[in-house]
Amino acid sequence: MKTTLEIPEKLIHNAMNATKIRSKSRLITVAIKNLIKNTDIKQIKNYAGKLDLDIDIEALRAR
């Protein structure tokens, strides 16, 4: 899908230098995928210590 975006050239340049990605399209695709991944990780971390899985640790260790 073609989309027109106004992104500061310096931001694109800095991101391309940092990642060594030479295609603007590829750079934006990687950035969006990383944003989604990081958001998913943050949402998963919100559950830390909040789920009761009813697991018997001692029974698992005995195996």
Image (cartoon, rainbow, N blue to C red):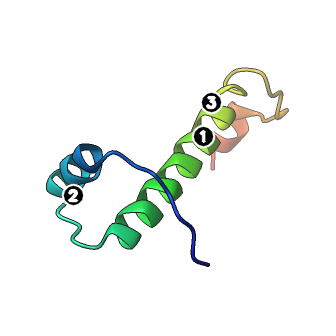
Q: Amino acid at mark 3?
A: Lys
In the rendered view, does 59 fall on the left or right side of 9? right
Disc on the earlier residue, 1 or 3: 1
Question: Is residue 18 placed above or below 46 in the rendered structure?
Answer: below
> Contact, CB < 8 Å: mark 3 with mark 2?
no
> Contact, CB < 8 Å: mark 1 with mark 3?
no
Closer-to-camera residue (51/30):
30
x and y, in percent, of residue 42 in the image: 60, 33
Disc on the earlier residue, 1 or 2: 2
x and y, in percent, of residue 26 in the image: 38, 71
Inter-mark Cα distance, 1 to 2: 22 Å
Q: Amino acid at mark 2?
A: Met
Residue on which the image places disc 1? 39
Residue 47's quadrant in the figure?
Answer: top right
Who's the residue at 85% across and 32% down the image?
Answer: 54
In this view, the mark in front (3 or 2): 2
In this view, the mark in front (1 or 3): 1
Q: Does dot 3 land on a helix, a strand or a loop?
A: helix
